[in-house]
Amino acid sequence: MIFNCQFIFYSYLCIVKKTLILPLLAAFLLLSGCGRQPAPDPLLRSRADGLIKEAFVNRYRDPKLCLQLSRQALGFIADSLPDYVDGELRTRNIMAFAYYQMSDADSANRMLALVEKTIARNDPAMRNGDIEQVITRLIRARLLQRDCRIADSYQLLYDIGRSGILDRNRDNMLYSYALSEYYITSLVLSYHYRNGQEADVRTLIGEVESQRDAIKVDFAQDMALNYALAYGWQSAGESLKALDYCEQNYTILSRPSAFCPYHYANTLQMTASALKSIPGRVPPDSVLALYDTARCVFYDYGDPYQMIGGTTSTARYALLIGDTVKAHDVLRQWLSWAAVQRAAAAKGGSPQWTPLKAPKMEVGLFDVLLRSRMASTPDEALRWYTRRTDLQDYINRNEQEDFALQQSLAAATRRSRWMTNTSIVFGALLVLLVVLSVLLWFSARRLKREKRELEAAKRRDVERIANVETTLSVLRHDVSPFMGYLRNPDLSPELRAEVLDQLLRTFDNIKGWTRLSIPGGMAFHATVFPLQEAFEEVRCQVPRPAADVQLRFEPADIQLHADRMLVVIMLRNLVGNALKHTTSGSITVGATMADGMADICVRDTGSGMDAAQVESLFRADRTLPAGSEHGFGLILCRYIVKKHDDLTRRGCRIWAESTPGKGTAMHVMLATNKNV
């Protein structure tokens, strides 16, 4: 109403004010209002739920009243709450159960088909479709049990158990009701229709008893579950435990609001069955009275299934204790009632009256009829015997189908368990392989890192050893000429003093090189200095050349960026090595600029070397002939050049150019002040 008034008001403004914005606003309100669905009225919803609840409460107590209330609820939902799908499903399942209680299997199946059809539509408003479908299957399983189609019934229970729907929510009343019905249906199947032959029946009872307090629904459901447990223990030979559950039902029945004739009669019959199994506990007449009272209550209740069960139980026990008169009276009452029902069905046009689909109950009844010898004619006895034989054959066929199904499901369960265990094993192996692969990968990385560290340590050790050997070579190389001079007895005092001064300077240089050869030793001090000054210092430190050898230092106007002391040591070794291998000719020390670098060259006219000797000239790890002094000074020069290149990053290097018999040219490339 409010939306309609708003729309009319804005339409009036559009006409009177003739604006363009207001028509758009009015159209928007119209479209948005039409798209919305009104929320359900809480009062209407509560009224529908009230009818549904009242029908549910009377499902055992008065099935006819339950059906009447359910029809009222369905009509109210159709008229006032057409989108209340959950209410419709709940009501139809209640009606199906009421028809089951009245032994009207056809009506119950029609109602269950309507529930399944509604669920198949998958209405978005539906919230409890999954659990209502479980309840539908449980009712259908009960109907199949009465028809002795136990294989089909067990298949439904098996599918429900595998679906896991009943494990999703244990706090919801609807789930508790479904779980309780699942246990009741499973117990009835195991102990009544399979005669307690299922291997894990005690396990099933233990599971039900452990869940007993968690699945409380109402008094009627509590009594139904108590009866199922009592029947289970009685079938398992535990009569005292069966009586304990009967006592619990009597306690509930003592409450006027909870009294239900159906549960009262069931409990009386179960009490009689349990007491019958305990000799001397109660007189036989008292047990027979319990059976007969239960039978009368079932007749008043009006369920043909329970009526035939009560009749059979009472007549069988009466025959057992020798009370043939009572057995005949009970059986005549049933036969009279059945005759009246057949006559009524014939007036309605029904070709043949079938009281219910309960082959096992009928087999028990015909057994009692034949044992009672009530047949008035041989034809009647033959008819009873033929009917019993046909029903027994039908039951046997269904039991064989059930046995085959059990074998098939057991094999499937074993295969599934084997596949599950195999998958777990292979999964564990796969995880183990992945873990091992990761560990191996990390181990390989660690081993590679350790290998690199070992190789680096080995290189450092080789360099350290080479440095030590080079240091000893320098000591021997540089000191030997001075020791030769000092051993000369004819050396003049002035010359001896000069030689000693040169020897002291040599030792000082060797001390610096020793510190340099130790890792972390003397630091590299790069300065800018004239190369010519280094030439002059080297000229003063090297021994005098032989008479046939001319030593010449060419002028060099170059500013080096290097460590002056190391450059002097290097040049002194290069010049000393040239003097050692040049017996005649000349030795020239000079320098030129090349690509911004100083190319220092020490050229001699000595013996020269071949290509192989040049290639191994600067290698510290080469094998030298015993007593050879050639090359240790050059190794020292290589380390000095390498030190310059490591610390200046200017591309410093040393190399040799030599021809056998024509001399050698040693080149050293160092940085200049222009590279700074």
Image (tube, rainbow, N blue to C red):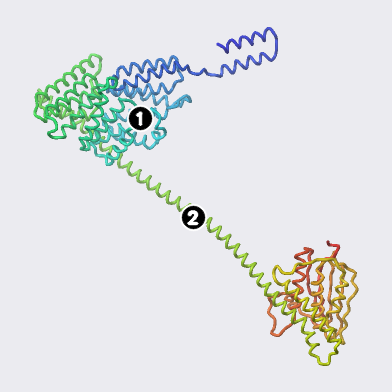
* Above or below, comparing residue 279 to residue 533 in the picture: above
- Residue 267 has which mark? none
Q: Which residue is mark 1?
A: 137
Taking the spot 52% from the left edge, 56% from the top edge, the residue there is 437
Is any part of residue 483 visible from this angle? yes
Q: Give the mark nearest the N terminus, 2 or 1.
A: 1
- Residue nearest the observer in this picture, 426 or 562: 562
Q: Residue furthest top?
A: 16
Say left or right for 499 vs 441: right
The amino acid sitting under disc 2 is Leu
| For discs 2 and 1, the disc positioned in front in the rendered view | 2
Q: How many marks?
A: 2
Q: Position of residue 53 (x, y in %)?
A: 37, 20
State the SS at label 1.
helix
- Which quarter of the image is occupied by the C terminus? bottom right
* Above or below, comparing residue 252 to residue 240 in the picture: above
Say left or right for 382 vs 675: left
- Residue 433 has which mark? 2
Taking the spot 17% from the left edge, 27% from the top edge, the residue there is 312
Looking at the rendering, which quadrant does residue 76 occupy?
top left
- Residue nearest the observer in this picture, 198 or 643: 643
Q: Position of residue 241 (x, y in %)?
A: 23, 35
- Residue nearest the observer in this picture, 258 or 336: 258
* Above or below, comparing residue 77 to residue 272 in the picture: above
Q: Position of residue 353 (x, y in %)?
A: 23, 20
Q: Position of residue 500 (x, y in %)?
A: 81, 83
Label 1 environment density (alpha carbons within 10 Å; few <14, some 14–19, many ≥20): many
* Above or below, comparing residue 161 to residue 87 in the picture: below
Taking the spot 25% from the left edge, 27% from the top edge, the residue there is 249
